[in-house]
Amino acid sequence: MDLARFPRRRYTPWPTPIEKLAHLSRELGGPEIYLKRDDLLGLAGGGSKTRKLEFLMADALARGADTIITVGAVQSNHCRLTLAAAIKEGLKCRLLLEERVPGSYRPEASGNNFLYRLLGAEQIRVVAAGGLNAALPEMVSEAASPAHKSQEGRRTYVIPVGGSTPLGALGYVACAQELLSQCFDLGLQFDHLVCTSGSAGTHAGLLVGLLGNSSRLPITGINVSRPRAEQEAIVHTLAEQTAELAGLRGAVPRETVLCLDEWLGPGYSLPTAAMIEAVKLLARLEGILLDPVYTGKAMAGLLELVKRGQFAKGEKVLFLHTGGSPALYAYQQAILGNPGLG
Ligand SMILES: *Cc1c(COP(=O)(O)O)cnc(C)c1O
C-alpha cells in the first residue's frame, strides 16, 4: 500500500526491533514468544501513540494550527506523547482529562500526570466520566477567542481520544508494513499477532495494513475498556474507514476482527491480579517493563491463551508492546503492595 501521499512527520528514525523472549518461551514450554518493541518509539517515553501522531501532527501543521487540544484519561500515554509532539513542532498543547474512575484524578499523582506538568501543558482541565462531549467544544471556543482585543485567537486542532481517527490509524498501517518487511529480512514467519485493543486505532490500522499487503497473519486483540461485541464493532468500523482512506479496495471481512474481553477485569485502568502477575513476570524474566492499563492486561491474556493451548507448540506468536511504562509509577502500590517489597 502506498502511504507516501500522506504528509508525515518522523518521530522515530528506524524500525522498532523484534525480539525473541527466550526465557518466557522456555518457561511456557509452548509457542515461541516475540515482542515488537513499539515501547521504543520516539518522543517522550515512547509508545504506540507516536506512530499515530506522525500523521496527525503533519495534518495539524498543514492546516496551520498553533494549538493542539486533545483528550484522555487521567494517566493517558496519548496525552503525554501528544504534548511531546506539540513541543517538538513548536505548538501549544491543552489537555482535557476524563476522570473515568470517579475520584481518580490527583494533581500530585506520579506517572503520566507528573509528565504533563513537567512537559508544561498549557492547560489541564479535568471532567467527570461522560463530560468530554460538553467540555471539548467549550475548550475549543475558549482557545479560539482572543484573551485581549489586541491579540488573535488560537488556530486549534483537536485530536480525539487515543488519536484513533482513520488518519491516526495510518500509523499502524505503516507499522504492519514495517513488520512485514522486517519478517522478510529476518526470514521470520509469525503465526499469530497479539495486541491491545483500546481506542482501536492500533488494532484497526494493523488489520488494514496486513490485509492490504495480502498477509494472512491473524490478529488477536485483547480489550482494555469494553465488552467483546462493542469493541469488535468499533474496530471493524474504524478499519473500514481506514481502508477507504488508504485506498484499499474491498471490504474488511468482519470475521478478521477478534477482540477478547476476559482480561479487562472490573474496567478500564482498574488493576487485576492477572495484570499484576504479567507485569512482574515480564520484568523479572525478561527485564521488560509492561504497563498496568494496557500491555499488562494484554500480556495476561496472551499467557492464559498459551496455557489453554490456543497456540501450538513451536508456533511463533508476536506480541505488540505498545508502551505505557511511565504509568507504572502511578501504580507502585497496586503492583508491589505495601511496603513495596513484594
Ligand atoms: C493507547 C494505548 C494502547 C491502545 O491502543 P489503541 O489504539 O487506543 O487501541 C495500548 N497500549 C498503550 C500503552 C497505550 O497507550
Image (spheres, rainbow, N blue to C red):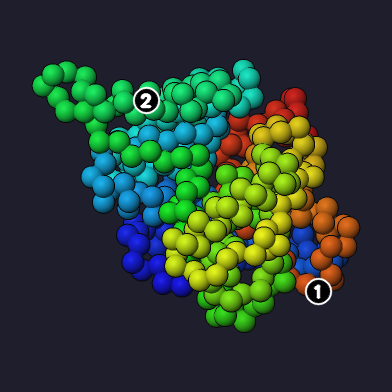
Residue type at mark 1 is: Gly
Instruction: Residue at 75%, 28% (x, y): give it.
Output: 337
- Residue labelled 2 has its Cβ within 8 Å of some atom of ligand 1: no
Whole-percent x and y of residue 129? 58, 24
* Circle nearer the viewer, 2 or 1: 2
Residue positioned most to the front:
250
Tag count: 2
**Residue sitting nearer the eye, 34 or 134:** 134
Q: Which residue is mark 2?
A: 139
The percent coordinates of residue 326 (x first, y second) are: 55, 39
Q: Which amino acid type is shown beneath numbered disc 2?
A: Met
Q: Residue at x 45, y 64 (%)?
A: 246
Residue sitting farthest toward the right = 308
Asked if 14 appears above or below 267 in the picture, the reply is below
| Number of other residues with Cα within 10 Å of mark 1, as a class: few under 14, some 14 to 19, many 20 or more | few
Visible in this render: residue 270? yes
Residue 314 disc label = 1
Using residue 1 as the reference point, say whether residue 101 is left or right of it: right
